[in-house]
């Protein structure tokens, strides 16, 4: 039976490729030799054997060549020939110089198959498809002077710097190259000045930012580093050896100490810093530049471990300036989460600092009056949903490259000119000093409905800092704790880098209104059957559906239809990473096992438990000392506890305890709204109810122990102290705690953040006989809301719906009723 092989067919490609087993397995080598014989006899008719000559002698010669190959003589035939290029041209061509479009996909090509001498004849080639091959890099001497479009999807590329040889390139795709990261995106944006589309996304604005603003900032830092540490080390008359020595020290030092932008871009920053430093030395001292890119990169890899310091991860590339005085250069970003209504997404509008005095008049209507109701918003009627992710700026595991194109959209917004920026300045007290010990970094308007800059109505509801997968031995407090925060509100969920203000990623569901987000870390199986930890974000809201998002892959891999009514809040168990609690307006709290997705994102979710409540649960918290046994919930009509131990057979359970608190007349009552609830430490609970002007601190253990035996008991909370707070009767201004620093935080109806440092009280409270503080504890500080203006109009009547800090209290994030995410940094 004849075997027919056309140029470029799988048979020919397979025939010419070197099998990895050939040197050791003579049978495999023999089979390959025969395959080469058959393939070449059809592809090159002139090589076919005469009928009267058997195959035996030629087979013996080929087998001898294979044995020579085993002995170290490598025989390799090129897969790409002139005939193949002419046939794969679109349309087919008769001359190489006439080819404008060429498809070389699915040929199992390796880097060695790209013959520069042959490609140099493709003088007018404009579109090249090299997808679905085995390329690990590009040869440095491919002469394609007119190449405009390049597709390298599904290869094994490890480096993109060789792409600079295609200066006219306008469109580039290299998705599903598992070794490329976001840093490579930034490299090609810098190297290819005409690049417009990267992985299908318009990166024009972001690329301009990388080439201009980023380069200007890094150049300034490199120059300052030289002047501060190295200029005086060089004598007036210096020798070549002295220059060589100081160059080596300077390059190593500058890559270690010059940091800028998010830590996910530290590799790109070091790459650019080294390039800028060499150019600087060449200009200043006449030092010759090293143009051997591959050598440089190998050196970088060898020194990377020692060179990378804590500072590098703390700040990096696309960084907006960290000092408020320079805030005018902030780059807009999109992203923040919230809970009420207001859908908004790709408007990355960031606020810039601007001196103003504090008179606050708002040009938009006041926030929803629905705030006074028991429910933040009415239940939405499910509509058709359009969802998608937008990504930007985080380091992803090797192997997920769809992320890249989308990633870019978030940072594109980080352009000075197109910020939709709101101007702000810290309010000063009468002495002319800032009334806070934190500086405002960014004020972002990134959940706007329809990307409108005029949207100051979308309410933001929930935010939570991303857990670190591995902080290693780094001790820097900023690096040791995450500075990436997930926020939700309206139709979008955003991930924001608190230092730079960049919106790293954005996820939208057009018919949703997100109320809550929560993180967990799952050991997911990757392609080679190994397990690797990845952060998963759960987001839920008005539709009663939980979205599960693999943030590193920019992929919403599943959803759980948890409730028929809106979900008010969600949280993961700290001890079982797949256990998710969802609290709904159907007056139920459900416990789900979300399972662990496989490499194809198949997963199975199951409901483990349903907790019945008499009223809508607003806030939930697992008891730190027994997170697998008791759950505490603040509800519309009281504070309840359930036994959640899974060993019990009962799947649907009533509450076990309801707590009483003093009302305005001092009488104990269970009927009050608890819209703020969090543990300050293992025992002390901070809760906020509808009683004006106070936040209660009470002991969980001492309160719960009074219940004695029985199923449902009403017990009085053992109050340890009251915190002085606003006298407003507005609800849903929730509180949070920072257990590591023993702080409580709560926003108010005037845009202020109340901060309580309780480290001087907790020791006394821990005593079994600890007495209640007689007086209300005043706030340690109150962060005043800076005056903001957009398009010359003032913003006022700002409610702080939620406020949180990272675990080390480095960053403070406040979510507002006017579609603004405010970020402060502790001084």
Image (spheres, rainbow, N blue to C red):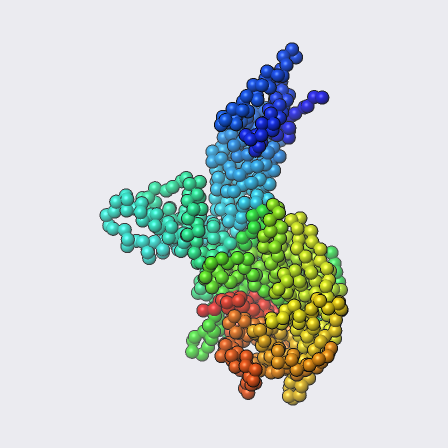
Q: Is residue 262 above or below residue 686?
A: above
> Closer to the camera, 600 or 344?
600
Residue 569 percent coordinates (x, y): 66, 67
| Quarter of the image with the C terminus in it | bottom left
Q: Is residue 213 above or below residue 361?
A: above
* Count of numbered marks: 0
Q: Is residue 724 above or below residue 600?
A: below
Residue 129 percent coordinates (x, y): 59, 36
Q: Is residue 256 left or right of residue 784?
A: left
Residue 179 percent coordinates (x, y): 54, 45
For the point 50% across and 40% down, which residue is it? 163
Residue 585 percent coordinates (x, y): 72, 69
For the point 60% across and 45% down, which residue is it? 528
For the point 56% across and 48% down, which residue is it? 398
Q: Residue furthest top?
A: 52
Quadrant in the rendering for residue 454: bottom right
Q: Is residue 358 left or right of residue 221?
A: right
> Closer to the camera, 327 or 730?
730
For the point 57% across and 33% down, which residue is it? 20
Quadrant in the rendering for residue 549: bottom right
| Quarter of the image with the N terminus in it | top right
Q: Is residue 89 above or below residue 49?
A: below
Work out whether residue 502 can be spotted: no
């Amino acid at each position: 039976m004849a075997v027919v092989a056309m140029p470029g067919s799988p048979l020919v490609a397979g025939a010419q490729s070197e099998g990895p087993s050939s040197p050791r397995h003579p049978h495999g080598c023999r089979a390959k030799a025969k395959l080469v014989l058959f393939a070449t006899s059809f592809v090159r008719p002139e090589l076919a054997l005469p009928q009267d000559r058997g195959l035996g002698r030629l087979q013996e010669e080929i087998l001898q060549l294979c044995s020579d190959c085993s002995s170290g003589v490598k025989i390799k035939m090129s897969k790409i020939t002139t005939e193949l290029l002419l046939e794969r041209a679109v349309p087919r061509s008769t001359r190489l110089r006439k080819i404008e479009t060429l498809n070389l996909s699915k040929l199992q090509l390796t880097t060695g198959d790209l013959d520069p001498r042959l490609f140099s004849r493709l003088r007018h080639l404009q579109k090249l498809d090299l997808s679905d091959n085995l390329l690990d890099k590009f040869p440095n001497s491919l002469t394609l002077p007119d190449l405009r479009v390049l597709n390298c999807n599904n290869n094994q590329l490890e480096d993109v710097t060789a792409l600079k040889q295609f200066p006219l390139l306008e469109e580039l795709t290299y998705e599903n190259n598992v070794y490329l990261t976001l840093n490579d995106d930034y490299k090609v944006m810098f190297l290819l000045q005409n690049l417009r589309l990267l992985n299908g996304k318009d990166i024009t604005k972001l690329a301009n930012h990388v080439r201009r603003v980023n380069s200007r900032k890094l150049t300034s830092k490199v120059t300052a580093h030289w002047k501060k540490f190295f200029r005086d080390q060089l004598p007036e008359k210096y020798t070549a050896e002295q220059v060589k020595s100081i160059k080596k020290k300077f390059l190593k030092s500058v890559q270690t100490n010059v940091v800028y932008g998010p830590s996910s871009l530290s590799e790109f920053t070091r790459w650019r810093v080294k390039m800028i430093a060499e150019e600087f030395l060449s200009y200043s001292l006449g030092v010759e530049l090293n143009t051997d890119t591959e050598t440089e990169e190998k050196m970088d890899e060898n020194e990377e471990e020692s060179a990378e310091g804590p500072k590098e991860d703390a700040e990096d590339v696309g960084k907006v300036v960290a000092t408020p005085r320079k805030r005018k250069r902030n780059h807009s970003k999109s992203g923040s989460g919230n809970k009420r209504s207001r859908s908004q997404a790709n408007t990355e509008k960031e606020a810039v600092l601007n001196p103003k005095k504090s008179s606050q008049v708002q040009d938009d209507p006041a926030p929803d009056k629905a705030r006074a109701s028991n429910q933040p918003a009415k239940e939405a009627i499910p509509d058709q949903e359009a969802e998608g992710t937008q990504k930007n700026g985080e380091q992803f595991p090797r192997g997920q490259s769809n992320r890249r194109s989308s990633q870019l959209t978030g940072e594109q917004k980080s352009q000075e000119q197109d910020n939709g920026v709101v101007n702000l300045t810290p309010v000063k007290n009468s002495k002319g000093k800032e009334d806070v010990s934190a500086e405002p970094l960014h004020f972002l308007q990134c959940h706007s409905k329809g990307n409108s800059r005029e949207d100051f109505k979308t309410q933001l509801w929930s935010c939570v800092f991303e857990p670190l997968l591995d902080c290693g031995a780094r001790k820097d407090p900023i690096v040791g704790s995450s500075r990436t925060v997930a926020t939700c509100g309206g139709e979008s969920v955003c991930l924001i880098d608190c230092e730079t203000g960049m919106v790293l990623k954005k996820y939208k569901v057009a018919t949703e209104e997100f109320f809550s987000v929560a993180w967990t870390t799952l050991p997911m199986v990757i392609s080679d059957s190994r397990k690797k930890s990845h952060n998963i974000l759960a987001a839920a809201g008005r539709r009663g559906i939980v979205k599960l998002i693999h943030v590193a892959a920019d992929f919403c891999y599943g959803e759980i239809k948890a409730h028929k009514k809106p979900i008010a809040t969600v949280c993961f168990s700290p001890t079982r990473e797949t256990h998710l609690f969802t609290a709904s307006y159907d007056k139920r709290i459900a416990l789900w096992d979300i399972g662990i997705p496989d490499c194809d994102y198949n997963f199975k979710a199951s409901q483990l438990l349903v907790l019945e409540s008499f009223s809508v649960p607003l806030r939930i918290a697992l008891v730190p000392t027994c997170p697998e046994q008791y759950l505490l919930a603040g509800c519309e009509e009281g504070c309840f506890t359930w036994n959640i131990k899974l060993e019990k057979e009962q799947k649907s359970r009533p509450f076990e305890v309801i707590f009483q608190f003093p009302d305005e007349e001092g009488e104990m009552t269970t009927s009050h709204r608890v819209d703020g609830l969090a543990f300050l430490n293992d025992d002390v609970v901070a809760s906020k109810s509808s009683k004006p002007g106070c936040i209660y601190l009470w002991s969980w253990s001492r309160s719960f122990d009074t219940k004695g035996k029985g199923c449902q008991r009403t017990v009085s909370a053992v109050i340890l102290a009251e915190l002085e707070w606003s006298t407003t009767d507005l609800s849903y201004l929730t509180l949070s705690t920072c257990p590591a620093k023993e702080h409580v935080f709560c926003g108010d109806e005037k845009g202020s953040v109340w901060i309580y440092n309780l480290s001087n009280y907790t020791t006394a409270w821990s005593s079994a006989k600890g007495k209640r503080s007689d007086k209300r504890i005043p706030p340690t500080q109150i962060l005043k809301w800076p005056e903001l203006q957009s398009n010359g109009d003032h913003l006022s009547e700002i409610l702080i719906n939620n406020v949180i800090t990272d675990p080390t209290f480095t960053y403070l994030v406040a979510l507002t009723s006017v579609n603004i995410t405010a970020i402060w940094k502790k001084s």
